[in-house]
Image (cartoon, rainbow, N blue to C red):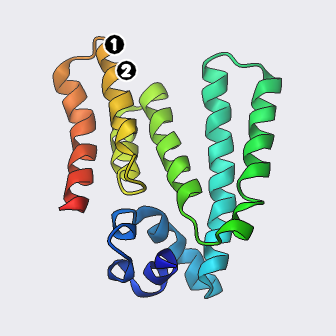
Amino acid sequence: IDYAAMLRDGWEAGGPNTQLRPLVVWLAQPVYALTGSAAQAFDVTNYIYTGLLAFLLSRLLEWYGASSFARLVAIVCISASNAFRLPAYYPVIIDLGAHAIMTLAIWHIIAGPRWAATAASAAAMLTREYAPVVVVFGVLRDWRLDVPLKRIVATYLPAALVYVLVRV
């Protein structure tokens, strides 16, 4: 309900917790402007996020050598379990969008380019309170790959700052 209020009336209309997760709500605003319905706006954007999440997971599986069959099963499972069931459970849920954005950040951390990893990691910090796991993943991966510390800091400090500033 808070997400619908944020969509209709702005960031301030959310509760203390939902105000910490504004990005998915902001991304639903164009659809809300077209439909005039918060439930429809989230329903449409959840289908978009389902497609994005399925595509990114397929790319990640391909990156690490999964078979085409394994990729197909993952795509079917994401499609069947997310977009088709979410509206019945909770029509204005943001989790699917949050997970798609966090997966996008992980994809860019793995496949590049680095500037996209920086931008996507910062965007992920505006989705859910557990989004810092994306930064932890990136920092540990870079450390393991002997990336210079200055480059690690330049890549992930903006995301850490976004996370802190939204919560201050």
Determine the secondary structure under disc 2: helix
Asked if the residues shown at circle 1 and circle 2 are in contact, with their CB atoms under 8 angstroms apart, the answer is yes
Report which residue position mark 2 lands on. 141
Which of the 4 image quarters holds residue 117? top left
Tell me what residue is drawn at x 68 percent, y 33 percent.
Answer: 58
Q: Residues within 10 Å of mark 2 (few under 14, many from 20)?
A: some
Which of the 4 image quarters holds residue 87? bottom right
Can you say whether 74 is above or below 12 in the image?
above
Can you say whether 13 is above or below 59 in the image?
below
Q: Is residue 163 left or right of residue 35?
A: left
Can you say whether 83 is above or below 9 in the image?
above
Q: Amino acid at mark 2?
A: Arg
Tell me what residue is drawn at x 42 percent, y 56 percent.
Answer: 127
- Name the spot of residue 64 as percent of width and height, x first: 61, 18
Q: Is residue 106 left or right of residue 166?
A: right
What separation in Å lies between label 1 and label 2 (alpha carbons)? 5 Å
Q: Residues within 10 Å of mark 1 (few under 14, many from 20)?
A: few
> Which quarter shows the C terminus?
bottom left
- Name the spot of residue 68 as percent of width and height, x first: 80, 24
Which of the 4 image quarters holds residue 31? bottom right
Circle number at residue 144: 1
- Name the spot of residue 52 as percent of width and height, x first: 63, 48
- Name the spot of residue 37 as percent of width and height, x first: 62, 85
Tell me what residue is drawn at x 55 percent, y 48 percent.
Answer: 100
Q: Amino acid at mark 1?
A: Arg
Relative depth, front residue between 114 and 49: 49
How many marks the image carries: the answer is: 2
Can you say whether 45 is above or below 116 in the image?
below
Relative depth, front residue between 11 and 150: 11
Determine the secondary structure under disc 1: helix
Q: Is residue 10 left or right of residue 153?
A: right
